[in-house]
Image: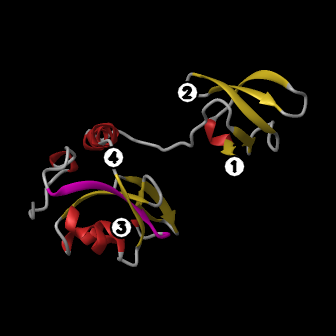
Amino acid sequence: MTDQPLSPLDFLHPAPEGWQWVVFHSKPRCEKKIASLQRLRPAKIFLPCLERIHNYDGRTRTNHIPMFTGYVFGMIQKQDRRWFQQNPNVANVIEVVHETSFLHPLRTIALAQQAGLALEVYPDFSPGRKVEIIGGPMKGLEAEVTEIKGKKTLWIRLDLIQQSVAMEIDISYLKLLN
């Protein structure tokens, strides 16, 4: 397993004997540095990225930012775990217990990227989560998500009046509260 595969789909499968899937929790802004470690040790690293296009003084620049900030996925040899853990860019190495359920969404992401689909990551707006409305006419209100209807319609409970109100709101106007 020393040759670099052309596509993540070539290696997003259960680990062979002597290998294991891990999630690298990176130090801030070190995801790409961790991905480059596969040149130093036998490893298969998957770092899904989102493409961002910015215009600076009439020039267009395309950046690729990690899809999941702070996380890099990798298949490493079991004997190399300590080596990766001691790398200054790695905060923690998390062992994957259920490979099948772990790999399925990663393969889906890799397939979507290979097909050229535009992907976007949104916070988990599941029922019970507290949100702040950061844009639009309801800006500044805090609410609790009670139900999700479609892609943009949320049932929220406004804390101020203790009533549930159906509201169609752009997800980009919401920010999760801790």
Q: Residue at x 19, y 72 (%)?
A: 41
Q: How many callouts does the rendering have?
A: 4
Magenta segment main secondary structure:
strand
Task: Tell which of 81 and 158 is nearer to you.
Answer: 81
The residue mark sitting in front, 4 or 3, is 4
Residue type marked 2: Lys
- 146 lies above or below 44: above
The residue mark sitting in front, 3 or 1, is 1
The colour scheme used to paint the residues is secondary structure
Q: Are marks 2 and 1 in contact (CB under 8 Å)?
A: no
Say whether disc 2 or disc 3 marks the residue closer to the N-terminus: 3
Classify 10 Å Cα crowding around label 1: few (below 14), some (14-19), many (20 and above): few
Residue type marked 1: Asn
Q: Are marks 3 and 1 in contact (CB under 8 Å)?
A: no
Residue type marked 3: Lys
Q: Which residue, given by chain and number where applicable, does mark 3 sit on?
A: 32
Which stretch appears magenta? 18-28
How far apart marks 3 and 1 lie (CA) works out to: 28 Å
Task: Tell which of 97 and 13 is nearer to you.
Answer: 97
Q: Which residue, given by chain and number where applicable, does mark 2 sit on?
A: 151
